């Protein structure tokens, strides 16, 4: 039918036009008089038919052109036949007809070949089902590249690099899901690929000479199987969304605690920086699952916005309220009677309950046998990357002895994780621990526990059976679950937020200025180098209609009258969260960024089927939202030049551009006065945390780098002024204290300057302020700081200056 319709459109339509209507065009070039006579005469039937015939001939010619183009595209893009469907209605009709004819012909040919000889059948199977063997090549494999410049490799980049089309990354994922990678790891998530992983590529047909039929039977591609593991296989929870990290199903409470721990860990990491050192190689490692839980918690609190509804992104699923209540009941039973977990999903449920109990406690103490920790975490060494609160012992008897040595006052939140006791003495001893009604120890057992409650967790994470008693209320509920990798990553986050403090090394104060901040950087770094950051600042000669402030809480203002630039109307509330993230990303890259970089940064954890289309949609929404809130006459906020997107300096004025320009001048100048002026401009332009309130993984490192640039400028100015003008140096350090409120070195130098200026009463206030600030990250001042404060409060006390 498709072939008949195609033949009719190609040959039957012109034949019918010539046969029944004839040639509609005149046989000679009409004169003006003849044209006027035709136009002024009444419309006749023959003239109407001629006009319709002319349109039919034009339509037929356009169809032939689209048919030829569609055939050409199908031949050139055999590996991507979907590209032939892009176009207008004529293109789609041509694609439907050609595809139907080709598929019907190939299907009938393959069916006829299947009924022939074995040799013919084998040859057809080899050419259709195993295209990689057509030209004698082995299976094409791409190795995941190590990170370069802070950018990690991804399926999106591999598709762009090897297949030439970023939209084909789902094809790579479908081809490699469940594959065994080097080291025995199974590929279970499209975004959890590691350097050295082997990614199979789809076949790319190319014209080759026909080969004789193969003699061997058609090869059957083996199914990749996962190694045996005690954790359940990744499952997709019922609901509209699925987890980026397969197997992660936790409650809103744990997600909120993870967000808080990430904030504390970042503050602790920032407090260890020495102003003026110029260090940038100590980035705080944060696992992807942490960002996923943080984003899921943020969406659970605020809800998705309209701008996010147009993106086919996935969201990590948080537990339902009923499942969270079931987890709380399970922990209560574990604290009063002990909880036994059995079934294929028992280990994943035990990991989730352990993390939930661990993060809910202020000072937890976790005791577990080493063998059980190895099985639970999937690591060869139980002490690898474990928080300080986790104590590994030899066996259950040693764990019970360790718990007995800890009084409830010493550790009010004790957690025991172990296999169910196999020996009778351990069984009696553990049962005796619950006889006194002491609920200070939460006991999670891997195995049956008859004196308490035992639950069976199936491979999907559902509690299908329980022992009689209070545990029956858990039946039918879905248990929280965590995979091994996610548990280790959350352990590392807990240790970074609540582990032992990494105290400052011995300060290297200079005899010249007596400050503990680092000495001046090497002068060799002040070498002129090409820089394009300050070009945006130089291009702005007149006031722009829009003013964007990214230091502190982001704000967007509009100047209705450019003749009066001091009068502005704030339009911050008009932009959604996603539009703000895109606007800030472009503002922090004034020189412009390519489309791939924007997609990799803003959609790194939420890859869309068509990232380019999503970016166009968000840019269109940004343009329309800004025009609606201001005026369409201001122009386009975002311009694209030479494949790079950037904010138009004629439309938008950004405070960060002034800061970046001063930073570039400091890096390129060799004159001390110019460098001091650039440092002063950096301190004056820094208006607080970069894009405060916007949480994105791409922003964390950039935000910390900008903050350290400001601190380095403060340190350089303080070193230059401390001897000649200690008063202004004190004010400078107090402003730097606002930049980094948890840095003890700044407080020490402030107390030294207060002592030199005779303000001994202020030293005690500075120490109390430090104690309050450090309490925000569960820390206290070091003994060295307290001793320094006590000594400096004496009016005649001297300051021991360490020699370099």
Image: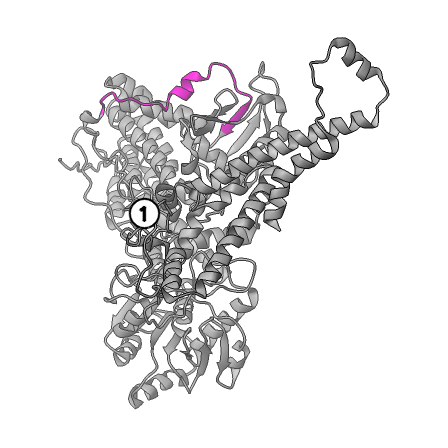
Q: Quadrant of residue 98?
A: top right
534 in magenta: yes
- Find the residue positioned furthest to the right: 42
283 in magenta: no
- Find the residue positioned furthest to the left: 803
The answer to whether any part of residue 760 appears in the image is yes
User: What is the quadrant of the C terminus in the image?
Assistant: top left
**Residue 716, percent from left and from top:** 27, 28
User: Observer-nearest residue: 508 or 75?
Assistant: 75
Here the colouring is one colour
User: Observer-nearest residue: 308 or 40?
Assistant: 40
Q: In this view, does 518 lie above or below 543?
A: below
| Residue in the image at 29% along x and 32% along y | 712
**Residue 502, percent from left and from top:** 26, 50
- Find the residue positioned furthest to the bottom: 424
In the rendered structure, the answer to whether residue 26 lies left or right of residue 311 reads right
| Residue in the image at 52% along x and 20% along y | 544
| Residue in the image at 48% along x and 42% along y | 74
Give the main secondary structure, helix, strand or loop, of the magenta stretch: loop
**Residue 262, percent from left and from top:** 39, 51
Say which element carries label 1: loop
**Residue 117, percent from left and from top:** 39, 66
Q: What residue would you read off at disc 1?
A: 284
User: How many marks overall?
Assistant: 1
User: Observer-nearest residue: 36 or 362?
Assistant: 36
Q: In which quarter of the image is residue 522?
A: top left
Q: Is residue 288 above or below residue 238?
A: above
Q: In this view, does 244 lie above or below 767?
A: below
The answer to whether any part of residue 311 appears in the image is no
The magenta stretch spans which residues?
526-548
Mark 1 Cα shell of 10 Å, populated few (<14), some (14-19), many (≥20): some
In the rendered structure, the answer to whether residue 487 lies left or right of residue 651 reads left
């Amino acid at each position: 039918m498709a072939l008949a319709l195609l033949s009719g459109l190609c040959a039957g339509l012109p034949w019918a036009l010539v046969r029944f209507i004839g040639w509609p065009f005149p046989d000679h070039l009409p004169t003006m008089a003849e044209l006027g006579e035709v136009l002024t005469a009444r419309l006749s039937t023959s003239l109407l038919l001629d006009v319709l015939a002319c349109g039919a001939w034009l339509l037929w010619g356009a169809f032939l052109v689209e048919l030829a183009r569609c055939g050409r595209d199908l031949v050139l893009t055999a590996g991507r036949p979907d590209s032939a469907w892009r176009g207008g209605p004529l293109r789609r009709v041509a694609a439907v007809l050609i595809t139907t004819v080709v598929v019907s012909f190939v299907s009938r040919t393959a069916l006829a070949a299947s009924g022939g000889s074995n040799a013919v059948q084998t040859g057809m199977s080899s050419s259709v089902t195993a295209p990689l063997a057509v030209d004698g090549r082995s299976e094409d494999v791409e190795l995941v590249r190590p990170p370069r410049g802070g950018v990690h490799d991804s399926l999106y980049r591999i598709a762009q690099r090897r297949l030439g089309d970023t939209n084909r990354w789902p094809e790579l994922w479908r081809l490699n899901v469940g594959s065994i990678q080097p080291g025995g790891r199974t590929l279970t998530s499209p975004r959890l690929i590691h350097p050295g992983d082997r990614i199979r590529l789809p076949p790319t047909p190319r014209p080759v000479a026909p080969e004789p039929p193969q003699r061997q039977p058609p090869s059957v591609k083996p199914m990749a199987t996962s190694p045996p593991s005690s954790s359940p296989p990744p499952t997709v929870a019922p609901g509209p969304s699925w987890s980026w990290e397969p197997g992660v199903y936790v409650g809103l409470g744990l997600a909120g605690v993870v967000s808080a721990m990430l904030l504390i860990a970042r503050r602790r990491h920032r407090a260890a920086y020495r102003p003026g050192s110029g260090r940038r190689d100590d980035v705080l490692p944060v696992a992807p699952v942490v960002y996923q839980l943080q984003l899921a918690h943020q969406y659970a609190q605020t809800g998705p916005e309209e701008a996010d509804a147009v993106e086919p992104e996935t969201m990590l699923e948080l537990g339902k309220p009923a499942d969270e209540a079931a987890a709380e009941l399970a922990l209560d039973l574990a604290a009063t009677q002990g909880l036994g977990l059995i079934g294929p999903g028992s280990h994943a449920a035990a990991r989730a309950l352990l993390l939930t109990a661990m993060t809910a406690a202020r000072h937890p103490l976790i005791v577990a046998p080493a063998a059980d920790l190895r099985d639970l975490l999937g690591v060869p060494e139980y002490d690898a990357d474990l928080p300080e609160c986790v104590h590994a012992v030899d066996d259950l008897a040693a764990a019970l002895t360790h718990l007995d040595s800890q009084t409830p006052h010493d550790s009010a939140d004790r957690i025991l994780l172990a296999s169910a006791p196999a020996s009778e003495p351990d069984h009696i001893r553990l049962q005796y621990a619950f006889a006194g009604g002491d609920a200070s120890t939460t006991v999670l057992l891997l195995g049956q526990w008859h004196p308490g409650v035992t639950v069976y967790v199936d491979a999907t994470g559902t509690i299908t059976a329980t022992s009689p008693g209070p545990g029956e209320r858990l039946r039918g509920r879905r248990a929280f679950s965590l995979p091994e990798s996610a548990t280790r990553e959350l352990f590392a986050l807990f240790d970074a937020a609540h582990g032992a403090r990494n105290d400052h090394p011995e300060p290297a104060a200079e005899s010249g200025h007596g400050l503990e901040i680092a000495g001046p950087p090497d002068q060799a770094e002040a070498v002129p180098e090409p820089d394009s950051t300050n070009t945006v600042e130089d291009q702005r000669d007149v006031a722009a209609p829009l003013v964007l402030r990214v230091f502190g809480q982001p704000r967007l203002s509009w100047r209705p009258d450019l003749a009066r630039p001091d009068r502005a109307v704030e339009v911050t509330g008009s932009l959604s969260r996603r539009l703000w993230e895109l606007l800030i990303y472009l503002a922090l890259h004034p020189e412009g960024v390519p489309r791939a970089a924007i997609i990799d940064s803003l959609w790194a954890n939420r890859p869309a089927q068509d990232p380019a289309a999503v970016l166009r949609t968000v840019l269109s929404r940004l343009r329309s939202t800004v025009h609606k809130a201001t005026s369409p006459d201001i122009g386009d906020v975002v311009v694209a030049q030479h494949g790079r997107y950037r904010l138009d300096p004629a439309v938008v004025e950004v405070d960060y551009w002034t800061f970046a320009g001063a930073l570039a001048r400091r890096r390129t100048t060799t004159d001390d006065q110019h460098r001091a002026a650039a440092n002063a401009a950096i301190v004056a332009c820094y208006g607080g945390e970069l894009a405060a309130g916007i949480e994105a993984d791409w922003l964390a490192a950039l935000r910390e780098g900008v903050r350290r640039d400001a601190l380095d400028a403060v340190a350089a100015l303080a070193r230059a002024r401390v001897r000649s003008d200690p008063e202004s140096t004190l004010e400078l350090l107090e402003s730097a204290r606002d930049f980094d409120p948890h840095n003890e070195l700044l407080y020490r130098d402030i107390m030294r300057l207060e002592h030199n200026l005779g303000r001994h009463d202020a030293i005690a206030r500075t120490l109390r302020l430090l104690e309050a600030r450090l309490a925000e990250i569960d820390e206290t001042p070091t003994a060295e700081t307290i001793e320094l404060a006590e000594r400096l409060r004496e009016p005649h006390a001297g300051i021991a200056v360490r020699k370099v």
